[in-house]
Image (cartoon, grey):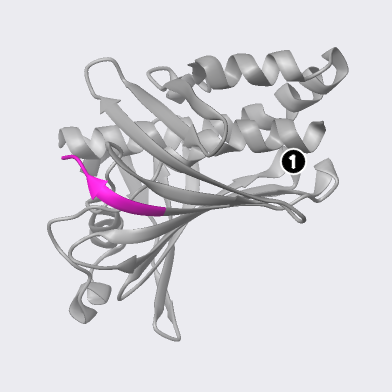
Amino acid sequence: MVINIYISFFLFLSLFFSGCSSTKFKKRSLEGSSLDLLKSGLSKACLSGEGRGRFYTEDERHTFSFESLLSYDEKRLDISYHFPFHGEETLSVFYKEAPKDKVTYQGSLFEKIKKDGVKEERESLKEFFSPYVNKLGQFLFIFHTFKEGKDFDSSIRCGGASKEKGFVKGECVFGKWSRPFGWEASIDHFSFFFDLPSHDGTLKLIFDREKEKLFSKWTVSFYARSHRGMPLKIENYITSCKR
């Protein structure tokens, strides 16, 4: 049952990150500053769209299709999932208070998680998921600030980047809340890394397979040694970006 609850919850992450851009990475772009490379990666993200995906645990795989809509006014992301032989589940993610480590969510998918889990499992899941959900909310807040185009440059502090075998790596801190995250870029690849020291874990977001001005594939993976070391991975394929 615990595995099934994991699967239901993590499917909502499929919507958080998809690639859509008006420019493409070019070799010369890797010579830019850390901030320029970060902005180039964010410029490809599209949080309103549709597509298909696959969710993996160590011994299970599930497929789905999705539709999403990001509301900048309400600072929320609405998601509809379509599962073969099951039907539709919905989820809404609210990130307005992300700088205060408060990210909330609601919808039939969340209600299903609560209904399917026994009390002990629900408490364990809440303790395990909350730090990861907060990191995702922080990414949404950063993305929102970038799209608004106000105070983004002054809110980001990036250290020097290092180069290694065709990749550029760096680390940045956002805003007064000083939440650090790492990033990595190549000609057609961009990744974000969020460490969770309390879980001895990592949230990793990988954007690649750039095609016709968008990242056609992106992957979200979670790992926490403190929770039986179970890796979780979601592969997402965007088919239509709604700007």
Q: Can I make out residue 6 in this image?
A: yes
Left or right, 243 with respect to 52, comes to left
Q: Main secondary structure of the magenta part?
A: strand
Residue beneath disc 1: 199
The answer to which image quadrant residue 149 occupies is top left
For mark 1, give the secondary structure: helix
Asked if residue 62 lies in the magenta stretch, the reply is no
Left or right, 86 with respect to 58, comes to left
Image coordinates of residue 114 in percent, x first then y, are 69, 15
- Marks counted in the figure total 1
Q: Can I make out residue 192 in this image?
A: no
Q: Nearer the viewer, residue 243 or 81?
A: 81
- The image shows residue 177, relative to residue 157, as above or below, that is above
- The image shows residue 139, relative to residue 122, as above or below, that is below
Q: Nearer the viewer, residue 224 or 14?
A: 14
Image coordinates of residue 34 in percent, x first then y, are 31, 62
Image coordinates of residue 101 in percent, x first then y, are 53, 23
Q: Which residues are magenta?
A: 237-243
Give, as a three-letter code, the residue at label 1: His
Image coordinates of residue 188 in percent, x first then y, are 31, 72
Q: Nearer the viewer, residue 161 or 120?
A: 120
The answer to which image quadrant residue 176 occupies is top left
Residue at coordinates 23% horizontally, 40% vertically from top-left? 146
